[in-house]
């Protein structure tokens, strides 16, 4: 296993264990109300209409105050870049949601793992100098993220179990020609709160 893949594996393990640890600590606190802390989220995730994708995830509320809500999100998703590649990812982020009446601004920072599969056939050189078809195992990438979302919160004033939001996410694809390749993705989604 090369050094880069080992580093990505360690970072992903830290993110998953950190997410599990935060959720376990929050659940073990008997003074914290558990009802309504978990929400299912579904996002359109893509670089506008050119690279469409979807993500499905869980939003877990760590702390809710009158002026800010701290939440931990975990998502699985993917997108399709026609004639270039298809990518699958898993990511986790921590965010702060600031309410403004029934609306909110949500700021998030996170890390993830992305695996991209080149579109089309892949070939490799044979020992005699010819070409042969190679297996397409894809490429691993470390995926740091940050996002800014604006939305309407039905939970806050209307006692509805959902939120809608729109915003932008910046993420970097590591190991792309030995550097980070920055991407900007549009996010449009809905968040449905469980156990109201």
Image: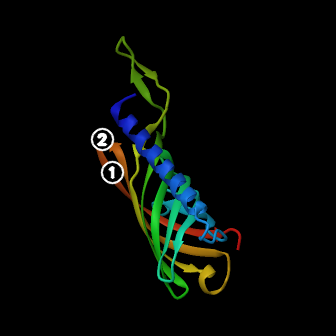
| Percent position of residue 123, x then y | 43, 26
| Percent position of residue 157, x then y | 61, 87
Quadrant of the snapshot with the C terminus: bottom right
Describe the element under mark 2 as helix, strand or loop. loop
The residue identified by callout 2 is 177
Q: In the image, is 57 to the left or to the right of 18?
A: right
Q: How crowded is mark 1: few (under 14 residues within 10 Å), some or many (20 or more)?
A: few
The residue identified by callout 1 is 181
**Which of 120 and 70 lies nearest the eye of the viewer?**
70
Cα gap from disc 2 to disc 1, whole angstroms = 8 Å
**Which of 9 and 82 lies nearest the eye of the viewer?**
9
Residue at 56%, 63% (x, y): give it.
26
| Percent position of residue 68, x then y | 47, 78
Residue at 50%, 27% (x, y): give it.
135
Give the colour scheme of this rendering.
Answer: rainbow
Numbered mark located on residue 126 in the image: none
Residue at 45%, 30% (x, y): give it.
122
**Which of 105 and 183 lies nearest the eye of the viewer?**
105
The answer to whether residue 81 is seen in the rendering is no
Report the number of numbered marks: 2
Contact between marks 2 and 1 (CB within 8 A): the answer is yes
Quadrant of the snapshot with the N terminus: top left
The quarter of the displayed image where residue 168 is located: bottom left
In the rendered view, would you say 194 is above or below 76? below
Residue at 52%, 53% (x, y): give it.
21
Describe the element under mark 1 as helix, strand or loop. strand
| Percent position of residue 175, x then y | 34, 42
The answer to whether residue 19 is seen in the rendering is yes
């Amino acid at each position: 296993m090369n050094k880069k893949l080992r580093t990505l594996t360690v970072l992903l393990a830290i993110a998953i264990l950190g997410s599990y640890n935060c959720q376990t600590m929050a659940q073990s606190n008997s003074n914290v109300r558990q009802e309504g802390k978990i929400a299912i989220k579904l996002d359109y995730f893509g670089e506008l209409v050119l690279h469409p994708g979807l993500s499905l995830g869980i939003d877990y509320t760590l702390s809710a105050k009158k002026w800010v809500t701290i939440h931990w999100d975990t998502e699985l998703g993917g997108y399709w870049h026609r004639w270039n590649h298809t990518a699958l990812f898993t990511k986790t982020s921590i965010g702060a949601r600031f309410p403004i009446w029934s609306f909110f601004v949500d700021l998030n920072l996170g890390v993830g793992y992305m695996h991209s599969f080149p579109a089309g056939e892949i070939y490799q050189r044979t020992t005699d100098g010819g070409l042969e078809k190679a297996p397409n195992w894809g490429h691993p990438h470390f995926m740091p993220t940050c996002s800014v979302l604006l939305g309407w919160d039905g939970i806050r004033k209307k006692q509805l179990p959902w939120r809608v939001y729109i915003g932008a996410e910046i993420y970097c694809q590591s190991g792309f020609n030995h550097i980070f390749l920055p991407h900007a993705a549009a996010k449009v989604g809905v968040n449905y709160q469980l156990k109201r």
